[in-house]
Amino acid sequence: AVNFERSNWATSSVFQDPFYSELPPNTTNAKPGSTLKVETTVNTTLYTLPPATALSRIVFMSETLNSTAVPASAYILWPYLPRSYENGTIPLIGWAHGNSGNFAECAPSHIRNLWYQFSAPYTMVLEGYAVVGIDYAGLGVHSSASGQNITFQTAVNAAGANDLFYAVEAAQRAFPKLSKSFVLAGHSLGGGVAWGAAERQAIRPVPGYLGAVAGSPSTNISSSAIRSGIIPFGGLEIADSVKSIFPDFNTSILLTKAGSAFLTLARTLQGCNSVINEIVNAAVASGTVLSPMDYLSDPTVQAWQKIGGSGGKNITGPLLVLQGVADATVSEIDTTIAVNQTVLAYPKASIEYLRFEGVDHVPVMYASQRLWLDWIAARFAHKSAKSGYSATTYGTGNAVMPLSAYQGNLNYFLEYATAPYE
């Protein structure tokens, strides 16, 4: 698993790549949204990008949940023929990815297919949009100019929302040809971040914001852990995040001795999703418990969930929510609860909730692709979104074939072609 992950790096280790590891001296006092470093033209042959697309990378200043300024990295995908837009600018989408892992080497800008490939960013750029895809603070750029480690605050939607807004601002500063108006979008962990961005916009409005798309949004990680059955090892994913917000937190509440040892191993290996999956599989096979079964009842963990989750808070819409009914990772039940909580508390909130029968986690981005592309185009056209709340379920009555006939999950990954016949 380690070798597989490393074989899909586009560059050397982020600890050796100067783009991530060497920061200019102006980072110490830079304000969030500042552009710290720009790599205008990236060697696209190192990646597995669609033909006729170009790539840039930036390092910018973001902000943690507790308002500490930290450097972070992002990529920008460029279309060959951008859509016509205001004053000749290129319409910009801010993209928040789903969980790729919790350590520095798990940054999408460091991975050949940018982690989500045609599930969203490739599709967006081929439709004529520029896409700024965040790595999240702590992924990619791993330490401040003073050498202080940056912890990825996973599943804290407000922190990810900071990354998303500040990446957009930094990209606009670096490349004035990008539009001042922008749409935000994300899936899974990033879907929660996009939702969190809509919540942030209600408190700290940013000019140019047109709305957000939240696909399979992670709104309640604790409930998801229960419904998906990951309680015996769920502490691996959130221990560092909880401690980054509550420094005095005792991680033994989340991790057994074996769990702590496995997390240390994963951190040493800089293991991402594939490695974590193998660690979990090995633990399950041997009957090793990595997390105490009662950790979700701990007051600090509950406080972390309340801070990090979404739903029931005011938003600035419009917000488009996409959810597969057959999602085994983010339950449709949890997304519906978050939507209902928000609508109940804020009846005027502009939320469009689309459910897709027989569709799983990532596939919802494919099943709904035509709809979210139309929705984004409408936002850039400054068309009025539906007011208030609306919900639609797609499935048996809409699909051409029986739902059982459709391909379920992705069964491929992008790799280099190394021979003429490939």
Image: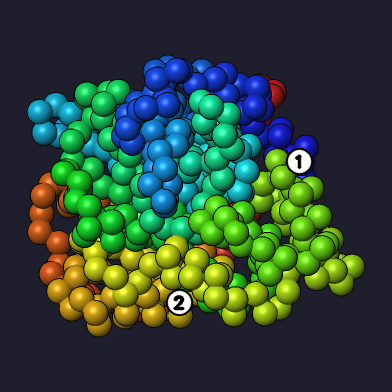
Q: Residue at x 56, y 45 (%)?
A: 151
Q: Amino acid at mark 2?
A: Asp
Q: Residue at x 54, y 59 (%)?
A: 246
In this rendering, is residue 45 above or below 332?
above
Determine whether, in the image, residue 312 is placed left or right of residue 228: left
Seen from the viewer's position, the closer of residues 22 and 280 is 22
Q: Which residue is mark 2?
A: 334
Q: Residue at x 55, y 53 (%)?
A: 244
Q: Position of residue 160 (x, y in %)?
A: 42, 50
Residue 348 in sight in this render: yes
Q: Which residue is mark 1?
A: 269
Seen from the viewer's position, the closer of residues 14 and 30 is 30
Q: Position of residue 401 (x, y in %)?
A: 45, 71
Identity of the residue furthest to the right in this view = 286
| Colour approach in the figure | rainbow
- Quadrant of the rendering where the N terminus is positioned: top right
The residue mark sitting in front, 1 or 2, is 1
Q: Amino acid at mark 1?
A: Leu
Ranked by sequence position, the earlier of labels 1 and 2 is 1
Q: Position of residue 168 (x, y in %)?
A: 30, 37
